[in-house]
Amino acid sequence: MVSTHPGGVQLSAQQYLPQASSKNINISPNQELLPLSAKVNSHDHLEIGGCDVITLVRQFGSPLYILDEETLRTTCRQYRESFQHYYKGQSQVLYASKAWSCLAVCAIAASEGLGIDVVSGGELYTALNAGVSPEKIYFHGNNKSREELVFATESGCTIVVDNWYELHTLVEIAENLERLGDGEMKGSFHPIRIMLRLTPGIECHTHEYIRTGHLDSKFGFDPNDLDELFSFVSKQSVLNCVGLHAHIGSQVFERQPHQDLAAVMVQWMGKAADYGLTVTELNVGGGLGIKYIESDDPPSIEEWVKPICEVIQTACAAENLPLPKLLCEPGRSLIATACVTAYTVGSSKVVPDIRTYLAVDGGMSDNPRPITYQSVYRTIVANRMSAPLTETVTIAGKHCESGDILIENAQLPKTQPGDVLVVMATGAYNYSMASNYNRLPRPAAVVVANGEANLILQRETYQDLIRQDCLPERLKN
């Protein structure tokens, strides 16, 4: 079947291009399907960051993650500048690096003035080695190990305490460090900077696996424990509680839940003051959604930021509280649209009267979101951008799983082996959740800008796959 607009105009992949360059119009990248620099070149190929995608695949192989630096930097600036414009106090945008943690992405975010939100020792190590200042690193997680807490303490980052077990463990670690500071390391101890993560009990419409603000969540202190919690923390001289944190979920389009959260957090801030805790920072989390398919209609970055700032300022004025430093931690909305994944088409299979399967050289190991969250994506044939969309196919991965389906009912031109298929908006939770299932090496990634492509992640080799394997002597021939 031929895909057309309601007016009868035949569609091609060009319908997915951004409406205008970010240099000419204030586009919010999370409302686009392709990176801001995407265009069609004279060869009818998709071009991103001034680089022909087909040339990139020939040079670096496929599957290939292609990160557009212009889109990532534009998104960082829009978040930062929106807070500066609408908030009268200090603000700090953090990149939630669980979306994609690697040296280059952290370094780009940091160069735009962002801090980094980490959730493991590995992400902390990555951020530090990317040159991020520890003062701008915030360490989350519901079950941080003692080793991770010691690492975080020694690094000087802020620890977002999630539960009583962690709180007591951290007090013990801090007291041991204080004793050392009074002895052989006299004068070297400083109270550990912490924030407290609270569960606000605010529901939002998103996938149940990525809702974190409702009371039935593994994250955060129960709000019914606030009195006990604030009382305990206020008595711990080894801890410096600077703020409160809450997060309601991911891929959220609604604006009201975040406004409700902002108001609730100011109430908590006032309650903390009753126990002598001077809260100087509030972190409202992240969660702004992006456009994965045409019908998705997320708010722009500015539309998300503005009401949060207004609610915080109004609530603080009503409670006669000083404006806190306002933090947020976007992940998906910062990085997802900036990246696409390029695949090479291989085999196909027609099941009469049911469907046509089109197989690519990747799948659930480089993008586990469809099989995990039933996530939906859009795709195009990058080497024939103006070709009419004449076929409906199911894009299948190459893994030994019937459920390894990337996209159902994809609208494409007639394809052939060797075509380059590009799946859009794959910057968030694709590489970071990638695996070696079926012993497939993880793909390479490049960052593109001004016609230049630089490798930021090397393609794994077969040797990499067995690098950590150990073969006992008795099993060797």
Image (cartoon, grey):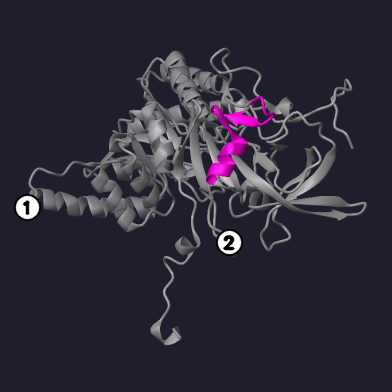
Compared with residue 113, is residue 195 higher up or lower down, i.e. above or below? below
- From the viewer's side, name the closer residue of 98 and 434: 434
Q: Which of 140 and 52 lies nearest the eye of the viewer?
A: 52
User: Which residue occupies the foreground of this view, 120 or 260?
Assistant: 120
Read off the residue under disc 1.
184
Q: Is residue 74 magenta?
A: no
Which residues are the magenta region? 40-60
Tell me the kind of residue under disc 1. Answer: Glu
Q: Within the image, what quadrant is residue 24 found in?
A: top right
Residue 377 visible at all: yes
Q: Which residue is mark 2?
A: 437
- In the depicted structure, whether residue 412 falls above or below residue 350: above
In the picture, measured across the screen, residue 311 lies left or right of residue 181, that is right
Residue ID at (69%, 40%): 377
Identity, as a three-letter code, of the amino acid under mark 2: Tyr
Say what secondary structure mark 1 lies in. Answer: loop
Q: Earlier in the sequence, mark 2 or mark 1?
A: 1
Quarter occupied by the C terminus: bottom left
41 drawn magenta: yes
Task: Indicate whether 181 appears above or below 299.
Answer: below
Q: Secondary structure at mark 2?
A: helix
Q: Quadrant of residue 83?
A: top left
Viewer-nearest of labels 2 and 1? 2
Residue 436: image x %, image y %? 54, 59
- Looking at the picture, how far across and down is residue 56, in whole percent? 56, 39
Q: Please, is residue 95 above or below residue 122 in the view? A: above
Q: Which image quadrant is residue 390 in?
A: top right
